[in-house]
Image (cartoon, rainbow, N blue to C red):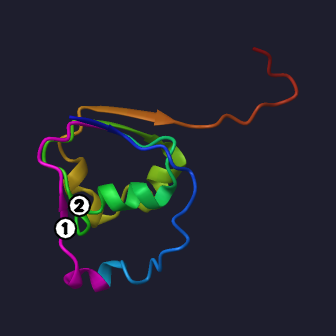
Amino acid sequence: MNLRIMNIVSQSSLDFNMFATENNQLYAIAVYPHLISLDIVCAHYHYVEEFLNEKKAYIPCLTELRVSYNDLTIVTKNFTREETRHNCVNIKRLILITQFAHTKDFYL
């Protein structure tokens, strides 16, 4: 199964402190047993957190991830955050989207 999320607006109407990791014992972990491809390039980084944090979601078959490089580094704390490792362990294809800083001498 493939999933693409397109929502660049933060879910600011929600109290994200309520869903903080230390409060997760009140909520069940979302399980996506058949999800193999996840595209969250056009999603707010809160969605990256919701899917990659093992305390919020369980995605055992995820083999392809398409995500903004900046969002990924924020959520994974520069690829050192333990809570994001398990949902990423089976990824075979990682597609990172980044914005380039164009200089005055850069031409397409």
Residue 9, position in %: x, y? 58, 56
Query: Please, is residue 102 above or below residue 12 in the view?
Result: above
**The C terminus is located in which quarter?**
top right
Q: What residue is drawn where x is 44% and y is 41%? A: 67
Foreground of the two, 76 or 47: 47
Q: Is residue 70 left or right of residue 48?
A: right
Residue type at mark 2?
Answer: Ala
Of label 2 and label 1, which has the lower sequence position? 1
Q: Is residue 38 left or right of residue 57?
A: right
Foreground of the two, 87 or 24: 24
Q: Can residue 76 be seen from the camera position used here?
A: no
Query: Please, is residue 5 above or below residue 57 in the view?
Result: above
Q: Can residue 75 be seen from the camera position used here?
A: yes
Determine which residue is flagged by label 2. Answer: 57
Which stretch did the figure color magenta? Answer: 23-38
Residues packed near mark 2 inside 10 Å, few (<14), some (14 to 19) or many (20 plus): some
Residue 90, position in %: x, y? 17, 41
**Magenta segment: does it hold 25?**
yes
Determine which residue is flagged by label 1. Answer: 29
Give the label on residue 47, or none: none
Residue type at mark 1?
Answer: Ile
The answer to whether marks 2 and 1 mark residues whose Cβ atoms lie closer than 8 Å is yes
Dot 2 lies on which element? strand
Mark 2 to mark 1 CA distance (whole Å): 5 Å
